[in-house]
């Protein structure tokens, strides 16, 4: 009877408290290990923890962005200090206006028309005369110095009326405009074709070197010629005529 009681005390049923506590402890350890492994995996993948933000500057951007902003501000300050990036030539009056002013300067009386250009060119003088008359054909043009300034003298024919105009070769001002009946019926001339005046000057200087002090273009007996007035290098002056069609030269002492 006594032996049977002792065996009943040593036997442990399947649902005893000790086994239940041990199972709970083992489960807790497994959960803890699983949580630790999950955190380590995120660290290895390079994902930054949610509570570890990237450092920012006080200005709201990264440190590099802040430096770039400071550089841009410095550049803006420099541009403002020197006039906002404006062209220095414009600020000191050295732009196109200055170049146009020098182009309008009067040539001296002893200028060489072979190497220096008048402010009002022959082509421009013809344009001014045509605009003044309201059309017409050019039959004569001449340039010389009239003891006061260089002056263009032009003759145009429009509807049977002959217009004679004087134009200041420095300012382009029409200083005189006379009209008369066209009795001569001279052929029209052109300072650009079939021979330009600079080409005629070159041909004339090939015959008589010197300083070109004037020239004219008109017709004689139906033949259109340039007359180039030259001060010879060895003294004296000469007139050289150049036929615009043939290029033939005649020297008139």
Image (cartoon, rainbow, N blue to C red):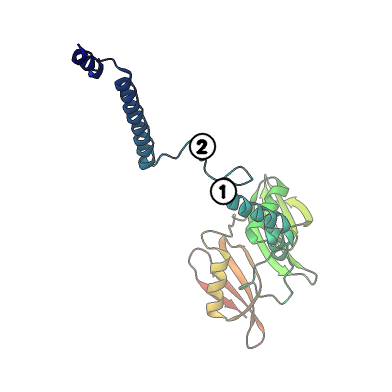
The quarter of the picture where residue 101 lies is bottom right
Q: Distance between the residues labelled 2 and 1?
A: 23 Å
Q: Residue at x 54, y 79 (%)?
A: 207
Q: How crowded is mark 1: few (under 14 residues within 10 Å), some or many (20 or more)?
A: some
Percent x, y of residue 235:
66, 87
> Which secondary structure, mark 2?
loop
Residue 171's disc is: none
Q: Which of 145 and 27 is in front in this view?
A: 27
Task: Assign the C terminus to one quadrant of the image.
Answer: bottom right
Q: Which residue is drawn at 32% across and 20% down?
A: 20
Q: Residue at x 34, y 33 (%)?
A: 33
Asked whether the residues under the numbered discs 2 and 1 touch, taking CB atoms below 8 Å apart as contact, a structural biologist would say no
Q: In this view, does 66 lie to the left or right of 51?
A: right
Q: Nearer the viewer, residue 8 or 5?
A: 5
The quarter of the picture where residue 35 lies is top left
Residue 51's disc is: 2
For mark 1, what is the residue? 65
Percent x, y of residue 92:
74, 62
Q: Please, is residue 52 above or below residue 192 in the view? A: above
Q: Nearer the viewer, residue 112 or 3?
A: 3
Percent x, y of residue 100:
70, 60
User: Residue placed farthest to the bottom in the image?
Assistant: 234
Percent x, y of residue 14:
24, 15
Whether residue 149 is visible, yes or no, is yes
Q: How crowded is mark 2: few (under 14 residues within 10 Å), some or many (20 or more)?
A: few
Task: Assign the N terminus to one quadrant of the image.
Answer: top left
Whether residue 86 is visible, yes or no, is no
Q: In this view, does 22 lie to the left or right of 103?
A: left
User: Residue placed farthest to the front in the image?
Assistant: 2
């Amino acid at each position: 009877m006594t032996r049977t009681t002792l065996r009943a005390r040593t036997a442990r049923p399947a649902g005893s408290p000790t086994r239940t506590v041990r199972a709970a402890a083992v489960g807790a350890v497994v959960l803890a290990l699983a949580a630790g492994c999950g955190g380590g995996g995120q660290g290895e993948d390079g994902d930054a923890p949610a509570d570890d933000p990237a450092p920012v500057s006080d200005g709201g951007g990264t440190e590099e962005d802040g430096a770039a902003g400071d550089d841009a501000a410095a550049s803006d300050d420099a541009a403002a200090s020197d006039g906002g990036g404006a062209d220095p030539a414009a600020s000191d009056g050295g732009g196109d206006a200055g170049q146009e002013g020098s182009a309008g300067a009067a040539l001296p009386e002893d200028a060489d028309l072979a190497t220096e250009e008048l402010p009002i060119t022959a082509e421009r003088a013809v344009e001014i005369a045509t605009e003044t008359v309201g059309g017409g054909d050019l039959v004569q043009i001449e340039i010389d110095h009239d003891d006061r300034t260089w002056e263009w003298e032009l003759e145009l024919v429009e509807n049977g009326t002959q217009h004679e105009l004087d134009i200041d070769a420095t300012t382009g001002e029409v200083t005189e405009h006379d009209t008369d009946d066209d009795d001569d019926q001279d052929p029209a001339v052109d300072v650009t074709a079939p021979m330009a005046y600079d080409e005629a000057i070159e041909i004339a200087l090939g015959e008589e070197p010197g300083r070109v002090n004037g020239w004219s273009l008109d017709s004689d007996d139906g033949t259109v010629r340039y007359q180039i007035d030259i001060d010879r290098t060895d003294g004296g002056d000469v007139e050289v005529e150049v036929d615009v069609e043939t290029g033939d030269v005649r020297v008139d002492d």
